[in-house]
Image (tube, rainbow, N blue to C red):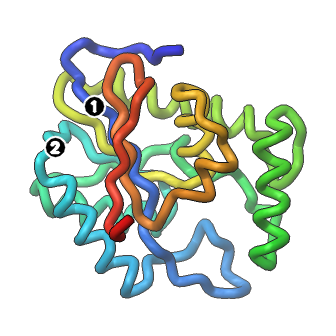
Amino acid sequence: MTVALRENVQRLILVRHSLPEKIVGVPAREWHLSAEGQQRSHLLAQKLANYQPAIIAASTEPKAIETAQIIAQQFDKSVEVMEGLHEHNRSDLSFVEEKKFIETLAAFFAKPDELVMGLETATQAYQRFQQAVENIIAKTPNGDVIIVTHGTVMTLFIAAFTGKEAFQFWQQIEHPMGIVLPLPDLKSLEIITVKSR
């Protein structure tokens, strides 16, 4: 599987947003970065310094925008906030205890065409996210593409192109983390983390 690309675009760098401040009663899509999340974003920005982004895009969610803005400072660039890059639509869910959430998410990845949680199936979320990524790449004439997004949709995209087991991969990603995928085939990946592994 490949995406429609221009030959001189070099790498797609998907970034999971940094650590949010979780507030019970406030939907996750409205959360902002915590102080530690801001600090981690600066560390990730430093690790991305050798890349050459022609565009830095973010989903419409505050925690993704704030992560992207910190990364963009590294390159003296602005952030383009774009539709379609948001997390799997779980806007109908209230705060869920973590163990239950993880169990439900395992079923979500295992049954991609069933509506397991939220308002989108895994397949619908993946297709929406993939189209948004393709649109960004299509409008980028050269350089790397950095997209700051969310763990579930990022995992669905990476699993589709690399063959990795989705739930297992999702369990390993951190806040924040960069995944570098070479264009055009997107088959291999490099992981950039701010924690020592």
The x and y percentages for residue 8 are 19, 17
**Secondary structure beneath disc 2?**
loop
The x and y percentages for residue 183 are 32, 22
* Label 2: few (<14), some (14–19) or many (≥20) C-alpha neighbours in 10 Å: some
The residue at 79%/52% (across/down) is 106
Image quarter for residue 22? bottom right
**Left or right: where 118 falls relative to 4:** right
Quadrant placement of the C terminus: bottom left
Establish if 104 lies above or below 93: above
The x and y percentages for residue 31 are 55, 75
**Secondary structure beneath disc 1?**
strand
Q: Amino acid at mark 1?
A: Arg
**Left or right: where 38 falls relative to 63:** left
Do the residues under discs 1 and 2 have CB atoms within 8 angstroms?
A: yes
Q: Which mark is residue 11?
A: 1
Establish if 122 lies above or below 141: below
Establish if 106 lies above or below 136: below
The residue at 28%/14% (across/down) is 6
Q: Nearer the viewer, residue 165 or 31?
A: 165
Q: Which mark is residue 51?
A: 2
The x and y percentages for residue 148 are 40, 52
Image quarter for residue 49? bottom left
Q: Amino acid at mark 2?
A: Tyr
Q: Nearer the viewer, residue 44 or 81?
A: 44
**Left or right: where 114 falls relative to 37:** right
